[in-house]
Image: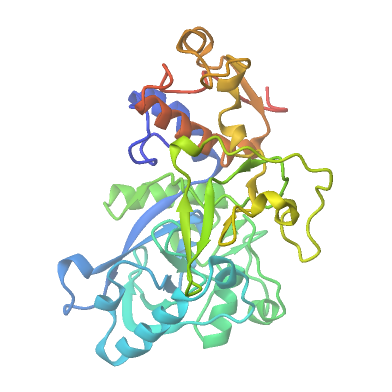
Amino acid sequence: MAKSCGKYHNELSEQEEVDFLAPSRLASYRLVYNFLFDSEQLTPQDNAIKTFTTRVDTLPGATFLIVSPEYDGLLNMVTPEYQLEVANYIEIAKNKSERERQIGKEKSAVFTGRFVRHPLNNQLLPVWVSDFVLGGYGTGAVMADAHDRRDCELALQYGIFINETVSKDGKPREDFLDKIKEGDVFEDYGVLFRSEEYNGLTSEAAKVKIADYLVKMGKAEKQVNYKFRDWVFSRQRYWGEPFPIEYVESEDGQVEIRLLEDSELPLVLPDLEDFEPSKDGRSPLAKSDWIRVDERTTREADTMPNWAGSNWYYLRFCDPKNDKEFASQKNLEYWLPVDHYFGGGEHTTMHLLYSRFGHQFLYDQGLVPTMEPYNYRHNGGIC
C-alpha cells in the first residue's frame, strides 16, 4: 500500500515496506506480465497487452486473452475490420454498472482481430473484449483458461478453445469439456499437467517457479494491488453521519445539487421516534419533516451509517468532551499513534484503508501530529 495510494502514503523504508506487504505476498502471488502482439503493424507503445493475474499456476493453460472495454489504447490495437464492432461494444458497456457487468449470466464479447504470443510456449492466443473484465481491476486485461468459471462460460459461448492444465491429482480429467459444460469447472489449487517443465508441480510451487522465470526474463513483474472501490452504505440508520447535500429544484423542473457551506455545518440530525424505513424502501429520514428545507429544496435522506465515523473515532477518543474541535493538539500528541489495533481480517481491505487514507489527509492539513494512525495491527485469532 505504501506505493499504491497516490499522494497519501508514508515513505516507508525498504525493509518496512517488505514487512508491511509480506502477508499479502504470502497469501497470493500477483503477477503483471506482457503478451506481445503477433503483428508488425502496431506502434511500439501498442505492441503488448499488460495482464494481471493471481493464478500464475494456470498460465501454461492460457488459450486466449480478455481485455476490458476501458483498456487503454484498445481501439488502436483492433484490426480495421473489427473497429466498428468493438467501438459499439465499448459504448454499450459504458451504460452498464459494474454489478450488471459482473453478474450477467449471458456473457458478451467481441473479437479484436488480433493475436498475441504466449510468454511461455510462444503459441498464438486470440484477444477478445468482454465487459465482465473491469478496467479498474489489475491492468484491465486477463489471460483466460479452463480454470475460471467466467472464462469457461465465455469460451463455450463463442467457441474458443480451452484446455485444462491443473487437476487435483495431476492427471487429466476424462471428458473435461463435457464436465465444464455441466458447470464442473476445476478452480482449486492442484497439480500441473500439460505444462511442459512445470508438470507435476503443485500450484503453489508452480506459481513461484513460473513467476521467477518470467521476472528473470524481463517479461513480468510481481505486484501487489490495492484499489479504493465505492464503499456501499447499505445499512441505512437515520442516526448515521448525514451528507451535507441539498437538492434544489428550479422553476423549469431541473434539479441541482448544492453542497452546504462550512458556515452551515455541522448538519444536525432530528430526533425521530419512528426510525423504520419508508414503505417504498427509502431511508428513515425520507419520512421526516427535516428533509424538506423549503418548497424547492430537500436534504439528502441517506446517511453514512457510522462507517465514516469508524475511520476516525480513535481521534475523538483522545478528547471526547471537546466541543470546539474534534481533539486538541495536546491530547493528540499525547495519545497518538494508536498503540495496538485489534480487529477482524475484514478490516484490512475496507475500514483500515479508508482510515489510513483519511488520517494522512488530516496530517497533510496539519490537523494530526502523526503520519500513521496505528503502531501495530493484530488480527483476531492469530498469535
In the rendered view, tell whether residue 355 sits above or below residue 90.
above
Quarter of the picture containing the C terminus is top right
The answer to whether 206 appears left or right of 294 in the picture is: left
In the rendered view, tell whether residue 267 sits above or below residue 206.
above
Q: Nearer the viewer, residue 182 or 277?
A: 277
What is the x, y in percent for residue 13? 34, 23
What is the x, y in percent for residue 201? 54, 52
| Residue beneath the point at 43% across and 37% down | 1
The answer to whether 43 appears left or right of 118 in the picture is: left
In the rendered view, tell whether residue 284 sits above or below residue 352.
below
In the rendered view, tell whether residue 383 sits above or below residue 61.
above
Q: Nearer the viewer, residue 134 or 152?
A: 134
| Residue beneath the point at 70% across and 56% down | 286
What is the x, y in percent for residue 321? 63, 15
Q: Quadrant of residue 346?
A: top right
Total labels drawn: 0
